[in-house]
Amino acid sequence: MKDFARSDNTAVQAQLDRLAKLSVPDGRLGLETILALLERLGNPHRKLPPTFHVAGTNGKGSTCAFLRAMLEADGYKVHVTTSPHLVRYNERIRVAGELISDERLAELLAEVLDAGEDLGPSFFEVTIAAAFAEFARVPADACVVEVGLGGRFDATNVLEPEVLAACGIAALGIDHERFLLAPEEGVPTEPLARIAFEKAGIAKQGVPLVTVRGNNAPQAQQVIKAIAEREGAPLHEVHSFENGNIYIDDYHYPEPGIRGPHQHRNAALANGMLRLQDRIPVSGDAIKRGIGSAFWPARMQLLGPGPLTALAGRQDIWLDGGHNPSAGAAIAKAIDGPLHLVLGMLENKDPRSLLDPLEGRIRSLTVLPVPGHEAHPVEAFGSDARGAANIEEALFAIPADDYPILIAGSLYLAGEVLRLNDELPV
């Protein structure tokens, strides 16, 4: 699987062009290539500060945002690598609290690409090798790492118990079926159990593995439990904050800074990962402040003033990159009442993922192309859908009423919306 990236910096773009040419040979699974690349770079993955490793189908990026906010609220410098980026590739590598600079990014990518030229690494393997190389070079107090795809064979799964403080698994759902449900002997055949099997592949001996009670179906949680026992990873199921009765040091948890009722579970997962590890102390007050201050772009984000929101008059515009059924269910809970839906979805996603959870509440449905990607045509969304060539055209056509607008269906589309509204992630 390949990704796409563009930069206004010519030195960075030269390396991104090299990245864009990389591909993964069909059928190649395993960590051999990323390990060989890291070996040539001096094994930086073994030189990281205490590291928090997060897998999941939905919510892993938000969990990473909560972890970062909680740690930074206690004064720590935190490295973070997440994916995908929304607007700039730099978003994937946050070094001691700051997005990597263009100048350093160009140098770093050139170094890693040169080192692995004969290995045939993937886009993501090069990205993770680059992130770990920079994290090992620049001092920091902690590191937060988001799994890219799956867990068992994900490039981030080179992390070893010696650097890991805790691992976490966010909510599971069916996504990336081509990769995560590929036929294989000796693995669960029920789809959700198989997804759990892949995600739980990040479990490591002696490292706390944290999930949220009730977040996953029983068959999925049973697989996670079995793998944790096999690997010798202490498994902890923490309570969600949704019931409103969870306290930190006698203080009630604040409303999460990232919107949506499902974010209570992601905040609880981050809290559990911090409290159940012993590598870096984090105060209850910092956890509380981090929950309230965390931000993760394109996750139920209310767009601020900008060129796009000016087209909608006084209507609120919400942005979310959700694109699978479980994300659709979470979005439906996060927004009350009727809305106008602007949707762009890649052709390998289920076009009903958001329509079904929002059934009966959609005042108008506008379908967009996803810039640079193959997307579902308007016909895939039923007779009530209308097409628009771009987001500006879609917003112009929406009736001026009291109902909010939701733009959703793809993180790639979300990135384009943020760029056009001058809200670049920082």
Image (spheres, rainbow, N blue to C red):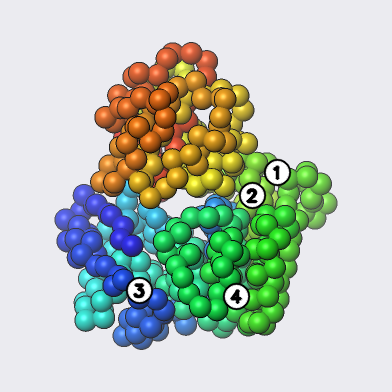
Q: Judge left or right: residue 87 versus residue 236.
A: left
Disc 4: CA contacts within 10 A as few (<14), some (14-19) or many (>=20) = many
In front: mark 4 or mark 1? 4
Q: Which mark is residue 254?
A: 1
Residue 277 drawn at (x, y percent): 68, 72
* Amino acid of disc 3: Gly
| Residue ID at (35%, 46%) | 347
First-in-chain label (4 vs 3)? 3
- Residue at the spot of label 2: 291
Q: Nearer the viewer, mark 3 or mark 1?
A: 3
Relative to the observer, which residue lies in front, 353 or 185?
185
* Residue 137 sits in quarter: bottom left
Sequence-first disc among 3 and 1: 3
Q: How far, Cα to Cα, is label 3 from label 2?
A: 41 Å
Q: Earlier in the sequence, mark 3 or mark 2?
A: 3
Q: Earlier in the sequence, mark 4 or mark 2?
A: 4
Q: If you read the primary sequence from the N terminus, does the residue marked by circle 1 or circle 2 appear first?
A: 1
- Please report contact status of discs 1 and 2: CB closer than 8 Å, yes or no: yes
Residue kind at label 4, given as amino acid type: Ala
Label pair 3/2, CB-CB below 8 angstroms: no
Residue placed most toward the observer, 330 or 346: 346
Q: Nearer the viewer, residue 65 or 215?
A: 215
Instruction: In the rendered structure, find residue 143 and report the number of the disc placed on it.
Output: none
Q: Which mark is residue 27?
A: 3
Left or right, 82 with respect to 104, comes to: right
Q: Residue 117 vs residue 320: left or right?
A: left
In terms of image quadrants, where is residue 287? bottom right
The alpha-carbon separation of the residues under discs 3 and 1 comes to 46 Å
The answer to the question of whether label 4 and label 3 lie on touching residues, with beta carbons closer than 8 A, is no
